[in-house]
Amino acid sequence: MKRLTLVILLIVAAMLFPGRSASAQANDFASSINLENLGRIAVFGDGRLKSFGSHANSMMDAISGPKRINGQEAAYTYLDLLFRPEAYRDADIIYIKNRQVRESIATVLEKQPRFGADIGERMATFRKTGLISPMLLGDQTLLGLFHQLEADLIKTAKQMDAIKSAQVVCDPRFLLNRLRIVPPGSGSMDEPWHGIDEVMFVAGKTSAPSSFQMLAQQRPPLTDIDLALQANIADAWRALVNAWTNVDANGVNAATASLAELLPKVAPDLYPNQNRLEWEQWYFVKDQLTRTWIVYMFSLVLLLIGFVYRWKPAFALGCLVFAGAFALQTFALLLRWYISGRWPNANMFEAVTTSAWFGGCGAIVIEWLVRKTTMRSLFLIGSAATSMVALMTVHFLPAYLNPNISNMMPVLHDIWLYIHTNVIIFSYVLIFMAAITAGLYLVWRVFGGGPAFARAGGAGAVVLAGVGPSSIAGSAPKVSFGEVLDGVTMVLMELSFVLLWAGIAMGAIWADHSWGRPWGWDPKEVFALNTFLVFLVLVHIRLKVKDKGLWTALLAVVGAGVMLFNWIVINFVITGLHSYA
Amino acid sequence: MAFPLALFSSVRFGIVLMSILFVYCSIGSAGVIFPSNGELVYDQLRQWRPFEMTEFEWFHWWPFDLLMVLMALNITVTTLRRIPLKAVNYGVWLIHGGILMMMLGCWIYFGTKVEGDAPVVRRMVTAELLGPAAAGAQPAVVDRATVIASPGQRFSLTDGTRRYDLEISSIDPEWTMRSGESDSKRAYSVNVMVRRSGGAPDDGVPASFMRQLLAGYPQHTEDVIPSGDPAQPMKRAIKAVGKATVDDGLRLSLDFAPAKWFYLRMELEKAWALYVRKAGDTEWTQRPIHGMPLYNDYVGDTSLVTQEPGDRPLPADPINVAIPPVANDPFPDLTLNVSGYLRYAFEETLWKDGGAQSPPNPRAVLRVAAQSGEQENYTLLALDPRSNKGDEGVVQFRWAPTEEAYNALLNKPSLRFHVPEIELDVTEPIADVAGANADAPFKPIPLPKAAPQDRLYSYRVIAVQDEVGFSTGNASVAIVEIKTPKGSYRRWVFSDPALTRDVTDEFLKDPHAATVIGDPSIEVQYHPGHGKSFVTLVAGPEPERLRLISSLGERVQSTVIEVGKPVPLSDTLAAAVMEYQPRAIAERKPVIVPKAQRQRDAGVQFSLARVDIPGVGSQWFRYHPYVFDSPAAVLRRFPFNPQTVRLPDGRMMEVIFSRQRLGLPANIALDEFVLTSHIGGFTGEMGSIRDYMSRVRFRDTDTSTWTEPVSVSMNAPVEYAGLAYFQSQWDPPDEPRFEGDRGSSGLNYTVLGVGNRHGVWTMLIGCCISVAGMIYAFYVKPIIKRKQREAVYASVAAKGKQAEVAA
C-alpha cells in the first residue's frame, strides 16, 4: 500500500514538473550568442552597477512583464529591439496585466477592419496572454480610451503608466540611451557613467554609419577618456551593430568580447568585479533559482509518506532531498547577497524567499532536537511545504514579487532593518508552518480522528520527554497522529508567538527613530498586532476549552490567514507606510 | 463572589475582550466590506460621515480607551487572584506585568503626543540700500528688504531717486571656490541679478550686474558685470574694473533664516486652523477650528459646487463650526463660521448662458479634427482679446456687431496707401513681417502711371498685432516703416485711423508735444481682415448667429455653422462648434474631483473650507500646508494666496485656511543640506539617493547664538529642548515651472518632522519584561517542571526502595 502510494505520488509530481516549452527554442542566431561576454559588461543606472543581463531584465520587465518574448533571453531581446526594431513593430511584445484594460483595448481594436482579417483572432490571443504589439497599441483610435484610463487614478491610471513606459522603453533611442556602460575616465565614485551613445561617433578604424544619427545626437569625443580607447570602444560597438544586423553570431561574440575587455580599461579600479557580474547574469538567466520549489515538492511527498506510514526509508530519502533543496535555496540566497551587496530582505521578493529560508533553518534545528521523538519529520514537512509555496509564488508571480535588485530607499538604511524585519519574517514563516501542521490535524479530524491534544504542549513536550508517563515526546507507539500534530503546532506557535511580539517591539524601536513615533496605527502594524491577538486568544483558550486540539488548529489557521492578509492584501491594496515590504 | 470581581478575574472575559479588540482593530485599520447593489463594496468605516476619524483618532476614541481600561483591569485582577506567585508562574506574571507597563507607557505617550513638521530654509538674503556716508561714519541704511534664498524671488529697494530691482537668478548649493586660501572649498552660492535705475548717471555703475554671495564667506562677495565683449559677455568685476563689487551703495548678505513654527500633522489628528491678520500686518493670528470634518464633502446648498457628470450626487449636508476670536485677536468682535468643507476640489470658472437680459458675450468651444483622429478643442471668448485666439492666432473667434464688420473679416490683412497729391491709392496685402530683422527689404509702393516716377515711396511691415485691448475697446495695429521723399518714418497704423501716429525720438521723449504724423502727405490705413488666422469663427450681428471663415485654401470661404455639426475645412480637416453661449456669464465654483481621479497621497492638499464672514457673505478658502508671513518667505512648490476681505466697516482682513501650528522651543536654522548618493552620484533617479541630511543649528529663544551644527538624517533624529527632529522632506532640483520662472538646483530648504516622545522608555521596558516572561513561560517553566517531576519520581522511587528495604 505505502509503496503504491509512493509511486502514484511520484508520478503525479513528475507530471507537474514543467517540461521545456517548445517556444523556448529560439532561432540559431539567438542560441549562438555568447551571453557570458555580455554578462561581463556593467551597466550603470538608478545608482547601481548591474550586469548587462540584469539591466536587460529590468528593462524588459517594463515591456513584457513576466513574459519572455519568443522565449529569448532578456539580454538578447534588448539588443535585438535596439538593432532591429522593425522586427518588433508588429510583434506582440507589450504585456498588459489588467484584464479589464485588455478587454477595453481589444474591443476598440477589433472594430478596425484596416488591421486585416485576423484582428479578431489576434485580439482573442491578446485577451488571453496580455501581449500586444507596439503598433496596435500606438493606434490613434485608442487615444480616447487612454485618456479615460488615465483619469481613473484608483483603477487604471497605474496600468496606463505601465503602458506608457512600455512604449517608451520599446523605443531604440531609449534603449540606447540607457546603455550607460562607459565608466567616467576620472574613476570617481561620484560621477555618472557615460552612455555608449556618447562615444559611438568617435572615429577609429571605422566611422559611424548614418543610421546612428537617427538614434542619438552626434557629440564631440569625451574629454575625460583617452581618445584612442574611446575609438576602440566605438569600433567594437560598431562591429557589434554591424554583426547583429548581418545576423553574424561569431561577429557579435567577438565584438561583445572586445567590449567586455575594453570597457574596464577606462577605469580599472572603478569597474566592478567581472566575476560578480557574470554570476549576476547567471542568476537572472536561471530565474533566481526559484525552480527549487520542485525539489521541495519531491521532499514533501517523501516526508509525508514517511510520516503517514511511519516508513523509515521514505523519511531518510525525504531528508536527503530536503537537504538538497535547502542547499540550493541557501546558495541562491548567498548568491543574491553577494550580487546585491546586502542581506536580501528589502523587498517583497526577498522577504518571501528569505523568510522561507529561515523556516528551513528553524526546521532543521528543531528536527535535530526532536529527532528521537514522535514529532520527527513534521517540522521538515512544514518547512518543505512552506518553501515550496513561497518559491512557487515568486516563480509564477514575478509581476507582483519583482525579483530585480535595486537600491534600498534611504529610510531602510538602518541596523533595525536587519533585526526587525528578519525576526518578523521568521515569525511569519513559523506561523505558516504551524498552519500546515494545524491543517494536517484538521484533515486527520475530518477523517475520524478523536479530540486529541498534546498534554504538555509546545516546548514543554520536548523538555519533559522521557520523564513520567508516556507523551508525544516519547517514542511510544500508542500516541495518536492528532496528539503529535497538536504538539508540533504548539512548538511552532510558541516560537512564533515570542518572535512576533519581540519583532513588533523591535519595529517600534526602529519606528521611534525613523518615523518619529513607535506606533502609528499603520495598517501593517495593526495587522501584525492582530495576528498576535489571534495567538493570544489561542494561548488563553487552551486553558478553558475541552477540545484543545481543534481550537488550536482552527486558531493557528486563522492566525496564518491574518498574517497572509497582512502580507498580501495590506501590501497590495491598502498601502501604508510599510509600502516597501 | 461580587459580580465585578468575578467578571474581572475571568479568563473567558479576557478572551472576549481580546476578540473585541481584534474586530475593532480590523475594521478601524483595514475597513469594511459589505454588499451594496449586488456588488461587494470596500470602504473605510472610520472615514464615514458619522466618524470622520483618522487612524490615530479611531484608536483614541472612547470605546477603544474603555476596552483598554477593561483589559488592564482584567489582567490585573486575574493575575492577582488566580495566578499564585510561584516559580512556575513567574513567566505569566512577567508577561502580564510587562503588558500593563507597556499600556501605561502608551497612555503617557499618546496622552501627550505632539507631532508636526517644520520647514527650514537654508539662507535668506538681506539687501540694504545705503545712503551717502558721512566722514568716518558708517553709511546709513535707507531701505532694506529680506527674502528667502530661492530662485526666482524678486524684490526691490528704493530711496526715492535710486531704484534697485533684484532677482535671485540662480543658486548653486555646491559652488567650488577658486580663490586664494579658499581654493576648491565648496560653498552655497547665491546669484542676485541687480537692475538699477535712477541715481547719478555717471557713477560708473552698470545698469545691470550680477552679485554672487557665498554662505560663510562674505569676504568673497563679488560682482559680475557686462563686458561688451561678445566672446565673454559677463566678466568678474575684479578683472574688469579692479574691484570686487561695483556698487557700494547696495549691501547684500546671506543670513540664517530661523524657523519658529512647526505645523501639526493632519494625518495624525485633525488640526484645522484659520489665520487672520489686518491687511498690511506681518504677524498672523491663529484661530484653531475644532470639530471640522476631514474625509467627506459637506455643503448646505449643493448648487454651490459642481460635480463631474456621472459622479455620485452629493447630499445637502451642512456643517456649522464656529471660529471665535482668540486672545489678542485683531478682530475681537468677529466670529467666523465654517459652513462647508470639500475634501478634494478645484475652483474653476464655469460658463453658462445669461439669457436674453445679459449683454452679448459670445463663447464657443471649437473643435478642429483631422481625419487621422487627432483633434484639438479651443475654448474661445470673442470679446476677450486674451482668449479669442488659439494656437497663437491660427484659430480665432470674433464678434461682428454689423454685417459690414463681418464682411471686413472676409478679407486678408492689407494696408491701404493713399497719397492724394499724386492720386496714389493702392491696397497691398500683408505678406511678411520683418520682426527683428533689420535687413528686411523695403517694398516699393507702385506709383500711378500719371504720377512723376521720382516720387518714390516704399514700406516694410515690422509687426502686426490684432485685437489689442484698450480702455476704449479693441483695436488692431500694424507697425510699418515707410520711406517717403521727405524721410523715413515708423508709423503705428491702427485699424482705427484716429489712433495712427508716427513714433519718433521726439515722441519717445515727450509724447504730448510731438507731431503726430511726420509726413502727412501719405495716409496709411490698416485693414486687419481676418488677420493671420486660418479659421475664424464669427458671431453676429445677431448674437445667436455663427459663421465660419476658412482661409486654408487659396480662396477665403465662408459658411454658416451650427452647434454640433462639423464643417469641412479641407480634405483632411473639419471644424465643429461643440458648445456655444451667445451671452455667456462666468461663475467661479469648486468642482469636486470624483473619488477615482484623486491622487492617493494628496491628503488634505486640495481641500476647501467655506467660511461665513458676518456682513460679507461666504467664501471658499483653499488649504495651505504652511502659513508664510509674506511672498518673500514662500517655499518653492508651496502655495501662498491669502484672500483679502473687506469688512462692512471698511477694515481689510487677510485670511488663510491652514492647519494649527505651535512655536518651536528653539529657533532652527539650516546650515547645509547634504544629499548623499550611491555610485555615480545623484542622477535625478530616486534610486541613486543614499541619504538626506540636514545640518541644523538651534538657538534658544532667549539667547542670540546658534549652536554648532548637528546632522539630522534618515533614521538619525536629533533631540533638542524636549523635541526630536527628523528628516522628512527635501527640495529636489526643478525645471522652470511657468513662463518667467527660474529653474532650481534644489537643496534650498528641508522639512523636519518634529515630535515629543514621553513614555517611550516605559513602553520599551514593558515590552522587554513581557518578552522575558514569554521566554520564561515557554522555555524555562518546562525545565522547572521537569526538575519537579524528577524530584517527585526520585522520592517515590526512594520511598519504594525504603518500603522494599523495610519489607
Image: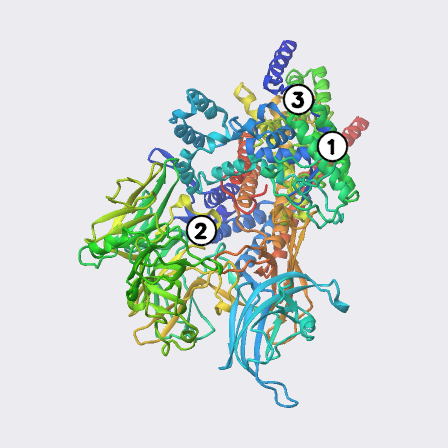
State the quadrant of the C terminus of chain B.
Answer: top right
SS of the residue at dot 2?
Answer: helix
Where residue A530 sits in the image (x, y, percent)? 53, 42
* Labels 3, 1: front one: 3
Q: Mark 1 lies on which chain?
A: A
Residue B234, quarter of the rendered image:
bottom right
**Figure check: B220 above or below A548:** below
Q: Colour scheme used in the picture?
A: rainbow
Question: Pointer 1 and pointer 2: residues touching (CB < 8 Å)?
Answer: no
**Residue at mark 3:** A29
Disc assigned to residue B63: 2
- Nearer to me, B721 or B507: B507
**Residue at mark 1:** A278
Residue A466 visible to the viewer: no
**Figure check: A399 above or below A4:** below
> In this rendering, would B37 be left or right of A79?
left
- Nearer to me, A190 or B715: A190
| Extreme residue in the left direction | B356
Q: Earlier in the sequence, mark 3 or mark 1?
A: 3
Q: Mark 3 lies on which chain?
A: A
